[in-house]
Image (spheres, rainbow, N blue to C red):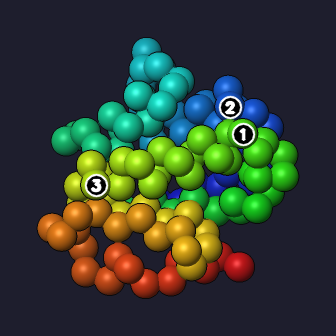
Amino acid sequence: MVIDVGAVRDDRDLHATLQRELGSPSFCGRNWSAFHDAVTGPVGRPAEIRFTRRHALERRAPRSAAALRERLTRHRETFGRCVVHYDDASGVFPGPAGGPPGGHGASGDR
């Protein structure tokens, strides 16, 4: 799964994008708890998520970009088998030891 965050303008827009791209039901919240549930939940969890156009997100919505990166870093252990890439070589967030092989490689959408 690829989530393009380049057009995001603010935190509200980021959560709407995450909700839409992750296929969360409309009754789910547009907040970090809902994002965490979508990525770690047992139903419909993607095997891999690649966030693209991070640099555009950082220019348009630096606080939202920082919050996303912080959540990805803080919760990487709880993603289970979901491997998360954040479009730069230092931003690969693999799941724990049980995750897919190769999760530590480069993730360059440069």
Q: Secondary structure at mark 2?
A: helix
Residue 14 position (above or below residue 30): below
Residue placed under numbered mark 3 in the picture? 77
Q: Which residue is at 32% across, 83% downward? A: 102
In-front residue for pair 3/92: 92
Disc 1 packing (10 Å; few <14; some 14–19; many ≥20): some
**Amino acid at circle 2:** Asp
Q: Is residue 20 visible?
A: no
Residue placed under numbered mark 2 in the picture? 11
Q: How many labels sit on residues?
A: 3
Q: Quadrant of residue 11?
A: top right
Residue 32 percent across, percent down from the top left: 48, 31
**Amino acid at circle 3:** Glu
Tell me whether circle 1 and circle 3 mark residues in contact (CB < 8 Å): no
Q: Which mark is residue 63?
A: 1
Q: Which residue is at 41% across, 28% downward? A: 33
Tell me whether circle 2 and circle 1 mark residues in contact (CB < 8 Å): yes
In-front residue for pair 25/89: 89
**Amino acid at circle 1:** Arg
Q: Which residue is at 67% across, 47% downward? A: 65
